[in-house]
Image (cartoon, rainbow, N blue to C red):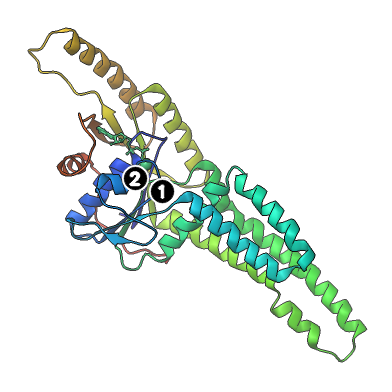
Amino acid sequence: MEPFVFFGGKGGVGKTTVSCAYARKCADAGVETLVVSTDPAHSVSDVFDQQFGDSPEPVAGIDGLSALEIDPDDEVTAHLDEIRTRLSDQVSASMVNEINKQLEMAHQTPGAYESALFDRFVDVMRDSDPYDRIVFDTAPTGSTLRLLGLPEFLESWVERLMYKRRQSIDLFEKAAIGNNEPRRVMDGDPVLQRLQERKEFFEFAGGALREDAAFFLVLNPDQLSVNETERAIADMNQQDLGVRGLIANKLTPAPDDDEDGRGARYLRDRIETEQQRLDHVRGSLSPPLLAEIETRTREVKGDLLGAVAEELAVPVDAEEPTFV
Ligand SMILES: Nc1ncnc2c1ncn2[C@@H]1O[C@H](COP(=O)(O)OP(=O)(O)O)[C@@H](O)[C@H]1O
Ligand SMILES: [Mg+2]
């Protein structure tokens, strides 16, 4: 299977849990694995009882597994700082103040967070060399995936800008006969160079996500979660990214056959409703349902993680990336 594996789904369904279980399953099979988490609330640090940070660290007690935790707020700040530095080099001092104001606002913009995370995911894929498999515990959402349409858009934009730029340089040269200097302005033009870099970045991202990544969605057997999953599948399809499979998590466990108290009847009722929803998932949603994981009585970590890993019918073999 593809080297990059993403688990998506709405908050709380079990993305982090399933990602860690799958990452452990890969590592146990001898596949050198990195699990990348982005959720400050409940993260790989909680699952493995070990603090992870900005660069990959081996997970204690599990050979062949490392973890990396990305703080989305830090990413947004770093992202905007980088833009600030780059722009400040390119514009007059009087503009810098205005740019800073705009960037402060950009920090609050919906999408700044996702866009910064997306960039970081792509960087992690680019630096994937030491690993056979990278597991991302959050998949890019529909709005982030729209960024993948950018290369074509940027392409015509860059071409248009270059055309304009060439025109003005030509005029400049006609005015300054015999002086070759203006050519250099065009060759090293920082704005065009930056756009070209962004275009290549999105081209890589699109290639890596389409050729080298597999997407799975985690869902719970409740109506909201099933609806959300249908929407996410449609969003992904729109970007030519297929969802490979679905993982149902937090299923109600069955009582023993001889139990017939109120509790047991409640559980059986619940199970029946959940199974109807899962029948709908199997019958109407195109990706296959690959696992049905029951709710455990305590947090999924340690030995429980191994048990959940065994229930995940997701292949672990890792192909070489074609795009890196
Ligand atoms: N099968 C399960 N049984 C019991 N608890 C679970 C199970 N799956 C997830 N949890 C718990 O539910 C909470 C949310 O899970 P998490 O994996 O953090 O979801 P997400 O990453 O999608 O927000 C965590 O406290 C986790 O331990
Ligand atoms: Mg999480």
Q: Amino acid at mark 1?
A: Thr
Instruction: Tell me the residue at 45%/37% (across/down).
Output: 233
Q: Quadrant of residue 216?
A: top left
For residue 43, which numbered disc appears in the image? Answer: 2
Residue situated in front as seen by the camera: 38 or 134: 38
Left or right of residue 296: residue 117: right
> Does mark 2 have its CB less than 8 Å from ligand 2?
yes
Give the residue at mark 1: 38
Q: Is residue 138 above or below residue 183?
A: above
Coordinates of residue 65 in the picture (x, y in percent): 24, 58
Q: Quadrant of the C terminus?
A: bottom left
Left or right of residue 312: residue 80: right
Q: Is residue 79 above or below residue 302?
A: below
Coordinates of residue 17 in the picture (x, y in percent): 29, 41
- Residue 2 appears in the rendering: no
| Real-space CA distance between mark 2 and mark 1, rounded to the nearest whole angstrom | 7 Å
Residue situated in front as seen by the camera: 189 or 113: 113
Residue lying furthest left: 258
Q: Amino acid at mark 2?
A: Ser
Tell me whether circle 2 and circle 1 mark residues in contact (CB < 8 Å): yes
